[in-house]
């Protein structure tokens, strides 16, 4: 068991002929993900790595291959269109890796997707990996992951790898790791992912990694307090970031007091989350929390 | 991205949002002409991106041509230091000279992308003139909010509700509502992330006017906003930040003395925190990004080294797409071009061993550490 992606995943990659798209499509396939199709308008009929069919449209790819999951690598100006194309083709899980999507575009997509069955992860995210299922849809280095029972959810890419690296070094495996994305508006929130981890029998506890900006961590804290049944260890980064400056991620900017790291830590603490005092202590905090 | 007040007001004008009659000048000789047009009672406003202009002496009301000339000449080509700038301040190249008004009421009006409601939210208060955080502290019940549906857009009834909520005189409800509708169109058309009018004033003569104008734009949308992008004023930014942007690096100058070079924004923030935990302070935020090559890493190192405050550098890399050996070569390359302070390096992930070897053999003053706890010890400044 795992969340979002597993052995049933049939992956299509939008933008499979681009530099990033082709590189990561190959890595996903190598890891064991069932890559069934690529989509690049104008390249329909060609093959990726001599075996995977490329289609002009997502609709066609879904019809011909039964693809149920999409991974998006198109440039920012085409990202909203690519997501909606997958939604309209009834793709269940869509991960948009693209960084730099205009926020007003994501806003429209978000409203649209609420009426649909698709789950959107991202944009501006590393994707999802389920080590026990040999399935990854995303750009994370596969080798650092081992199968296990800890879920990881984070707004950041490399910081997720840092967390996973520390867990793996202590022999603590992961059920699924989800990078929800660094933009102010994203398809799935901490709460959405926590709900999935709560329902997943193979997840015993969760590492939640947040950062400055917005109130997503406070919303997560509210949910954990009221409805989450498993132990959570939480880390918030950006305690030394000044207000008013965007720290790389479009969403990582302190615009008011609630966006500060200290406020987020306070909320998580009140929700009973085990606070990870320093980035160097992620692994050990989880080990102690779960008595491993 | 920010633009100047006079540029924001030009955009307001284009969207029929009333602004004071005013002119922007960069030469003292032009002041005479403008005062004869506007009369002797004018306000002179330094055009800088930093907030806190008023308190720093960047906004002055004058009542004669002599005074206007004097104030303008003092401001133009000076550096203005506010609580938001570095101690050197930001250069004033232009001042905006505007007619003054007899103000009856000062209102606050703002619009911004709200991540929790996933929509643009309009914020208004009858207690304008001070910043919104201040209003939130002192009069939080006097902050009105309307969430705008991205497909429907601002609805006239929402604008009316805000007008009544702010106790706008009946004769002005219609013009206030049209300001809101126009403001929302401006927001959408130009990919804004925030607009603030503080204050929006009602004059003794019952006119409604945007006395100030502040607009931020979504950096990620600038590719389709060429006119907005052309208004970027690099003089208002730290030169290192400008250079970093041109090299496609994400860099923010901070006031500490330990520089850092990291891949990924989240890890970069975590690295800043680790530096703080060691008792030192980070000199910058820097994310080289996933696809960095030797040149980009070298460029990043040079930008960090160009900050004279930097006494030590912490390189913290989790190789994924970015290969550690490539990064190591970039560091060595930079050391050949600039003077480099001692470097603490932690490398993990793709080709980390190869990267460490390159650094060890380079002859550079490099301390390799295996984890963040070790790094914390090394980063203490003596």
Image (cartoon, rainbow, N blue to C red):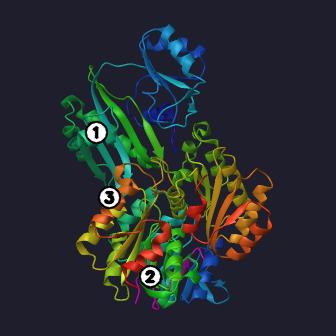
Q: Please tell me whether mark 2 sits on a helix, a strand or a loop.
A: strand
Which is more toward the observer, A93 or B83?
B83
* Chain to which mark 3 belongs: B
In the image, residue B189 above or below residue B373: above
Q: Residue at x 19, y 34 (%)?
A: B167
The crowd level at tag 2 (other Cα within 10 Å; few <14, some 14-19, many 20+) is: many
State whether residue A162 appears in this view. Answer: yes
Q: Give the residue number, with chain letter if any, for mark 3.
A: B117
Please give the label number shown on residue A176: 2
Give how far apart the Cα atoms at labels 2 and 3 are.
28 Å
Which is more toward the observer, A103 or A135?
A135
Q: Give the residue number, with chain letter if any, for mark 1.
A: B135
Measuring from the top left, give residue A280's x and y in whole percent: 50, 69
Q: Earlier in the sequence, mark 3 or mark 1?
A: 3
Quadrant of the rendered image containing residue B25: top right
Q: Which stretch appears magenta?
A: A1-16
Q: Please tell me whether mark 1 sits on a helix, a strand or a loop.
A: helix
Give how far apart the Cα atoms at labels 2 and 1 are.
44 Å
Main SS of residues in magenta: loop
């Amino acid at each position: 068991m795992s969340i979002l992606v597993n052995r049933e995943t049939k992956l299509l990659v939008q933008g499979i002929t681009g530099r990033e798209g082709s590189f990561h499509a190959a890595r996903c396939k190598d890891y064991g993900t069932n890559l069934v199709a690529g989509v690049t308008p104008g390249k329909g009929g060609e093959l990726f790595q001599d075996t995977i069919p490329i289609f002009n449209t997502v609709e066609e790819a879904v019809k011909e291959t039964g693809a149920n999951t999409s991974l998006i690598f198109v440039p920012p100006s085409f990202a909203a269109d690519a997501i909606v194309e997958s939604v309209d083709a009834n793709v269940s899980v869509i991960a948009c890796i693209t960084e730099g999507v205009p926020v007003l575009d994501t806003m429209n997509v978000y409203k649209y997707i609420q009426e649909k069955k698709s789950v959107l992860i991202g944009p501006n995210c590393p994707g999802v990996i389920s080590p026990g299922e040999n399935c990854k849809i995303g750009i994370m280095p596969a080798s650092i992951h081992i199968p296990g029972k800890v879920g990881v959810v984070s707004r950041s890419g490399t910081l997720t790898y840092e967390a996973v690296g520390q867990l793996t070094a202590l022999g603590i495996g992961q059920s699924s790791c989800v990078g929800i994305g660094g933009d102010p508006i994203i398809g799935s929130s901490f709460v959405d992912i926590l709900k999935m981890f709560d329902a997943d029998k193979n997840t015993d506890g969760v590492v939640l990694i947040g950062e400055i900006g917005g109130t997503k961590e406070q919303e997560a804290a509210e949910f954990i307090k009221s409805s989450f049944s498993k132990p959570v260890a939480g880390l918030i980064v950006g305690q030394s970031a000044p207000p008013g400056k965007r720290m790389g991620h479009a969403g990582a900017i302190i615009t008011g007091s609630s966006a500060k790291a200290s406020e987020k830590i306070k909320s998580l603490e009140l929700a009973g989350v085990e606070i990870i005092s320093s980035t160097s202590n992620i692994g050990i905090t989880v080990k102690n929390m779960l008595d491993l | 991205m920010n633009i100047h007040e006079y540029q924001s007001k030009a955009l307001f004008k284009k969207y029929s949002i009333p602004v004071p009659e005013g002119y922007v000048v960069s030469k003292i000789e032009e002041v005479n002409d403008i005062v004869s047009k506007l009369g002797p009672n004018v306000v002179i406003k330094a055009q800088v991106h930093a907030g806190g202009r008023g308190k720093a002496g960047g906004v002055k009301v004058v009542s004669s041509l002599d005074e206007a000339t004097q104030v303008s000449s003092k401001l133009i080509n000076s550096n203005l230091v506010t609580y938001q700038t570095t101690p050197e301040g930001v250069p004033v190249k232009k001042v905006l000279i505007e007619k003054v008004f007899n103000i009856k009421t000062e209102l606050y009006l703002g619009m911004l992308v709200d991540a929790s409601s996933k929509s643009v939210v309009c914020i208004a208060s009858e207690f304008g003139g001070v910043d919104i955080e201040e209003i939130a502290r002192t009069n939080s019940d006097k902050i009105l909010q309307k969430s705008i549906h991205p497909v429907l857009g601002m609805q006239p009834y929402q604008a009316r509700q805000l007008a009544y909520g702010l106790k706008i005189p009946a004769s002005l409800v219609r013009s206030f509502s049209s300001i809101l509708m126009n403001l929302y169109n401006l927001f959408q058309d130009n990919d804004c992330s925030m607009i603030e009018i503080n204050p929006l004033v009602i004059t003794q003569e019952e006119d409604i006017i945007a006395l100030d104008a502040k607009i931020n734009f979504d950096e990620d949308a600038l590719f389709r906003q060429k006119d907005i992008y052309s208004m970027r004023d690099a003089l208002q930014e730290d030169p290192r930040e400008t250079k970093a942007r041109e090299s496609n690096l994400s860099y923010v100058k901070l006031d500490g003395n330990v520089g850092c070079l990291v891949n990924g924004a989240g890890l970069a923030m975590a690295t800043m925190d680790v530096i703080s935990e060691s008792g030192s302070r980070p000199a910058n935020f820097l994310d080289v990004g996933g696809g960095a090559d030797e040149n980009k890493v070298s460029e990043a190192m040079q930008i960090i080294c160009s900050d004279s405050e930097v006494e030590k550098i912490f390189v913290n890399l989790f190789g994924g797409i970015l290969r550690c050996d490539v990064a190591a070569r970039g560091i060595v390359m930079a050391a050949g071009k600039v003077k480099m302070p001692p470097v603490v390096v932690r490398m993990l992930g793709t080709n980390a061993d190869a990267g460490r070897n390159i650094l060890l053999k380079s002859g550079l003053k490099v301390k390799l550490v295996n984890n963040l706890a070790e790094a914390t010890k090394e980063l203490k400044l003596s």
